[in-house]
Amino acid sequence: MAEKDGQLNNNHDLIQTMELPMVDVSILTQDSNEKSIVIKQIQEACQTWGAFQVINHGVSEAVIQAAMEVNRNFFDLPEMMKKEILELGSRDMFSPVKLLTFQRSARGSDLLQRDLVRLYANPFEDFIDFWPTEPADYREKMGRYTKDVRKLGITLFGAIMESLNLGPTHLQENFDKGMHMVIANSYSPPTPESSIKLGAAPHSDHGIIIILRQSSPGLEVLDMADGKWKALPCSEGSLQVLVGDHLELLSNGIYKSVFHRATLSTRTTRMSLASFHNFELDEMVEPATELTGEDCPKRYEGCSTRDLIKHIFSGEVGRLIDRLKI
Ligand SMILES: O=C(O)CCC(=O)C(=O)O
Ligand SMILES: [Fe+2]
């Protein structure tokens, strides 16, 4: 993999930027010879890096920026105005909308903190009424973004199934019904006297794929080839796609969910939008039988999205799918 010159991350460490393949999604929706090249590109990326980038993906820059902005405005609201959502979300970890300050520490290091608002978004009509009503344009702007990013998620899922030689419609109906969860992360600088450190501790994400946009760089991914943390690219027009735990499991370990982290010391608020595409909450996901056999035994026990989310909220160290390895 070619790499750019080193650059400073927000912690002033010199790190390289991961040069991830750029997939042109418009080719996936055409019936052309180029399509098989793009599918191959996806296969290689999911196997080697657990991530890739997309362009011509159907989510316009204006829609992305509007979603980013409306979440920035949401986090800037007085605490009292966000309280109603906090109360609704505090009922349980599976509330359709949840606002929380998420804290985790990497083994033996400081607690890293971010604020996040999490929305369920599929089926859209079932959840929109739970979403914030303030700012007044929140539902409209986030509605547009989640619908467009969902369409992209469905296109990518088909391509990913094809890249595993499972056929473009493999599990399509299950995926269409699946859970779409959008998280807006906000890393807002604490007061100078505060000891809070901003960031996200190293983790991999639940779900099949995660489609991501950062307002500014900050996310680092672990390069499986050399074990080094590298900056996830962040450029206008593109979106980044991460392989999630359920895709690692479904692919019987052929694809790898990517470890990532954010360590920040910014003076301005950094935002990110992470769109998690999952199967239904209680659907048991197993390694595809087509990918298991005498030469390649089943490598994982199955688990549901609910199991994966419960594990995250349990605060237990390590990934659930590692415990499910056979
Ligand atoms: O802030 C980011 O760029 C990504 C945050 C993240 O990893 C997540 O929401 O799971
Ligand atoms: Fe993540």
Image (spheres, rainbow, N blue to C red):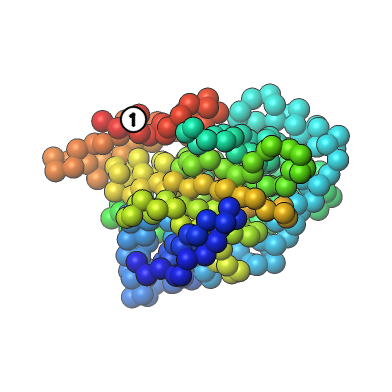
Amino acid type for the residue under numbered disc 1: Leu
* Crowding at mark 1 (Cα within 10 Å: few <14, some 14-19, many 20+): few
Please state which of residues 251 and 18 is positioned toward the viewer in this rendering: 18
Whether residue 216 is visible here, answered yes or no, is: yes
Expressed as whole percent of the image width and height from the top left, the position of residue 121 reads 63, 44
In the displayed structure, 117 sits above or below 304; it is below
Whether residue 239 is visible here, answered yes or no, is: no
Figure quadrant of residue 124: top right
Is the shortest distance between ligand 2 and the CB of mark 1 under 8 Å?
Answer: no
Figure quadrant of residue 213: bottom right
Residue 295 relative to residue 208: left or right: left
Please state which of residues 39 and 110 is positioned toward the viewer in this rendering: 110
* Residue at (57% x, 36% y) in the render: 110
Residue 243 relative to residue 293: left or right: right
Mark 1 = which residue? Answer: 324
Please state which of residues 251 and 48 is positioned toward the viewer in this rendering: 48
Expressed as whole percent of the image width and height from the top left, the position of residue 81 reads 85, 37
Quadrant where the image shows the N terminus = bottom left
Residue 221 relative to residue 85: left or right: left
* Residue at (44% x, 70% y) in the render: 4
* Residue at (52% x, 65% y) in the render: 7
In the displayed structure, 315 sits above or below 205; it is above
Expressed as whole percent of the image width and height from the top left, the position of residue 57 reads 54, 66
* Residue at (75% x, 31% y) in the render: 86
